[in-house]
Amino acid sequence: MSQSATATATEASSNGKQQVYPEVDLKHANILATGLDKKQLRVVNGLGNLMGTKEVTDVHIDELTGKPISQKERKHISEQPWTLDNWHQHLNWLNVILVVLIPLAGWAVVFSGLIPLHRNVLYFSVFYFGLGGISVTAGYHRLWSHRSYNAAWPLRALYAFFGAASVEGSVKWWGHSHRIHHRYTDTPRDPYDARQGLFYSHMGWMIVKPNPKYKARADISDLLEDWVVRFQHTHYIIIMLLSAFVVPTLACGYFFNDYWGGFLYAGVIRVFLIQQATFCINSMAHYIGTQPFDDRRTPRDNWITALCTFGEGYHNFHHEFPTDYRNAIKWYQYDPTKILIYTTSLLGLAWDLKKFSQNAIEQGILQQKEKKLNRERSKLNWGPSLNNLPVWDKAEFERNLSQNPNLVVIGGIIHDVTGFVEEHPGGAPLLNDALGKDATTAFTGGVYRHSNAAHNVLANMRVAVASEKVNAAYLFAGRRGERYDKKVN
């Protein structure tokens, strides 16, 4: 035990108070979570201000006083209304060019008919779409962002090169953003906060400048220790241009004599489609689908998104079990990324595939089912709670019986059956014979073993608990599924 912990325990003991455990130092814990306790390798790629990082740390000067303005004092552009004068300042122009303008130009050429789509180019484009997409899901996402398995350097190099072909940033940038997303899901610090709307979570977060007030960090020291990640980030622009545009252009030109078709369809249009598919994980997978594991946050399982993202659509599972190398756990669920990872492990290229225990998974499913059932249960009238009923002894029961002869004891609970005698499915004579008596044995099988529905109807007639039969009353109610933390004394 540390000295501070000992002091805490001693002080509590000397004051005569219950001994307490020392609490986690939140400031230190957050430093650990962001990796600031370690010496970080500095890896830059030359994009500078276009990445939007300089704006977050720059010191601004007040034009009137000449003094620095702190980040808290100045109003960031994201907090200002859009106007004709400042609209261009709201935009992240690097991403606008890569995600909006280049695809728009590409589609304009497609619809103009200047460059026809030949069959071989189409087949290659589909193949290259899959190669780039699965390099993001198996590499960027499950390998680097979540460390759900380990991979040999040749496989990591392939994922880094062809992942860059999707033009979604470097592994370092992508992984950092994604870890922040998991750390701050559905909060202002979430880079693609689903609560800000479908368009924002889909692609709006990329094309508008974020508010530095909500900047966040996550520990990516493990990523920086990987020479493949460092090399790709340092040379990202060259690698991205080569893999996204030069390779498909040359491949289609060499094999099919269609350089322009390769550039347009296997390059520009393919990049647009893979970006939009990936964005669906941030948007559609937080809006459409089921939540079989937890519904406290927005992620959902959505098979439609899984189809276009190589299995990444089972997002509710993923957010609950992020280091599991699988997204889909059912045999019929579509997850080719899981299959690829498992196959590479058979070839010795991947190892240490992580899986959460089936017991933990089944627990999550059961807990969510219970939450849904409890919500449905709360909509129904289940009769008075035993804890809210008075406790009558035999004398008090007799006094009340003299005023109301329609009292029956069943399971240690006193019921007022006024108005139900003529409705009794077994006939009025049977119920009249039980008035003023304990009919537990008759009710539970001595005369007729009553149904679950009979128990539910009976519960709405409760008026008191017999003091001599308190424990029996709770046992009787428990058979119906009622739960109580305390019993009446």
Image (spheres, grey):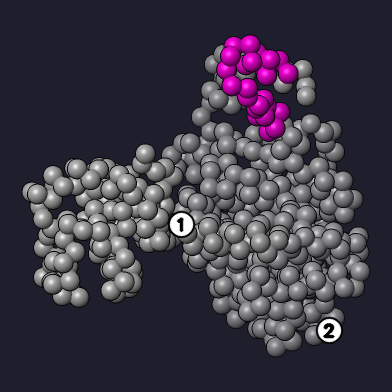
Q: Range of the magenta residues?
A: 6-30
- Residue 66 appearing in the image: no
In the image as oriented, which residue stretches furthest toward the left?
A: 403
Closer to us: 104 or 68: 68
Residue marked by disc 2:
255
When asked about the image quadrant of residue 125, the answer is: bottom right
| Residue holding disc 1 | 371
In this picture, is 365 found above or below 5?
below
SS for tag 2? helix
Residue at (90% x, 50% y) in the render: 227
Give the side of residue 489 with respect to residue 324, left or right.
left
Position of residue 267 measured from the top left corner of the image (x, y, whole percent): 72, 70
Residue kind at label 2, given as amino acid type = Phe
Q: Position of residue 414 (x, y in %)?
A: 24, 53
Q: Above or below — where is 299 with respect to 340?
A: above
Q: Label 1: state its secondary structure.
A: helix
Q: What amino acid type should be assigned to the residue bearing mark 1?
A: Lys
Please check the rendered image and state whether residue 24 is part of the magenta-colored stretch, yes or no. Answer: yes
In the image: residue 32, left or right of residue 371:
right
Indicate the position of residue 130 as horizontal and vertical percent values: 72, 74
Q: Which of marks 1 and 2 is nearer the N terminus?
A: 2
